[in-house]
Image: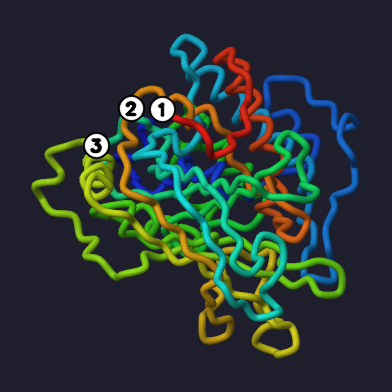
Amino acid sequence: MHSFPIRSIFPVPAVFLSLLMLLTACGAPSESSLVGTVRSNIQLAQYDSSIEYDAEIGESPWPDEEAATLAIKEIIEQTVRSRYMSNLPALRHVHPKAHGCVLADFRVNETLQDEHQHGVFQANALYKAWIRFSNSDSDPFREDKEGDGRGISIKLMGIPGEKLLSDESSTQDFLMISHPVFFINDPQKYLGLVQSLSSSNLLSQLSVPLSLGIEGSIIAAKINSKKIANPLYTRYWSAVPYQLGSGSYRRAMKYSVRPCNELDNTPQEIQFKDPNYLRAAMKQHLSTNDACFEFLIQTRDTGTAAGAALSIERVTNEWKESEAPFFQVATIIIPQQEFDNPEQHKFCENLSYTPWHAVLEHRPLGGVNRIRKVVYSSLANLRHSMNAVQPIEPTGNENF
């Protein structure tokens, strides 16, 4: 993604645009004006007018959510076309700069609490995983020394059972950023944000903080100020909720990964001489050592007042560990490896990551995830079409 000149005036919007697709949520005016904001002719009748949500678990639709989602999708598609049509290959709309894509092992604990043993979390299960580390900013050439949200995308393979999307039959994706909450909840606000950042009008761009409000602006500033020494030394959070289990046993969860051992993640001034020092740091570590992460989940206990108060839709609100403690359910081992080669990079850049690559027991929850379902699939199809490549479902047996 290209950078907006507004960054030099108000640095927070840089992360707004870069995180659009990572977690999305927002909105705008009336349905008629929403549709009128995009340059193509959207026919709402083409889409199911009912939004699927689980009220019992705590989901509820936002006002004008469906129309806002379609308008967001159209605007972002047009942004990608205009950005890359004469500058192929088309990259991801956000998180276009990868620090490395590595093959890993995801092993579930030998013993689990019964309430956690759902979906992929089956005692002692072992899965191969392709893991992509990235900067969230939309500019693929932005230097790593700049503050930014950092991302990790995990694709498990060899997953049995029915999936929520039909394009991949044996995968489960987990997407996270380096902050425990997102900066926006409401689809209408999100559409307003997309419109402002896509506008060439300076006054429209300057209106971004107003649409986010004080809370959203503070969160975005925190996300956009993060500087790290190594993606392998960083903790990541889902920031948005997911389902754990099915039927009467289902509950909401959030997840996180953290390094198995606490490592100094303060970047050194000498690292800043290399604009891509995070890739270099990963290469150096994995050339001689394995890397290790703990995979954690926290669940929402609606049997208590504190647990019931944890919101599904308001992802600007953190689930405090005092009210929903994290439990380790698996360990990720990234073995020592050489990953920095053109063939492996090209392979990974053609992969599609979406939280809706999931088994039914891990259904994404909330308005942010409902928007992602529409936008992520659309953008992946657009990117593959522009690059004239076929989408692939990895197996973990690839060699480069």
Pointer 3 with pointer 1, Cβ within 8 A: no
* Among the two numbered marks 2 and 3 on one chain, the one whose residue lies closer to the N terminus: 3
Q: CA distance from mark 3 to mark 1?
A: 22 Å
Which residue is at the front of the view, 166 or 120?
A: 120
Tell us which disc is closer to us: 2 or 1: 1
Position of residue 113 in the picture relative to residue 265 (left or right) = right
Which residue is at the front of the view, 211 or 242?
A: 242
Badge 1 marks a residue whose secondary structure is loop
Position of residue 143 in the picture relative to residue 99 (left or right) = left
* Quarter location, residue 306: bottom right
Q: Residues within 10 Å of mark 1 (few under 14, many from 20)?
A: few
Tell us which disc is closer to us: 2 or 3: 2
Q: Amino acid at mark 1?
A: Phe
Q: Which residue is mark 3?
A: 276
* Among the two numbered marks 2 and 1 on one chain, the one whose residue lies closer to the N terminus: 2
Q: Which residue is mark 2?
A: 341
Q: Amino acid at mark 2?
A: Asn
Residue 399, percent from left and from top = 45, 30
* Quarter location, residue 55: bottom right
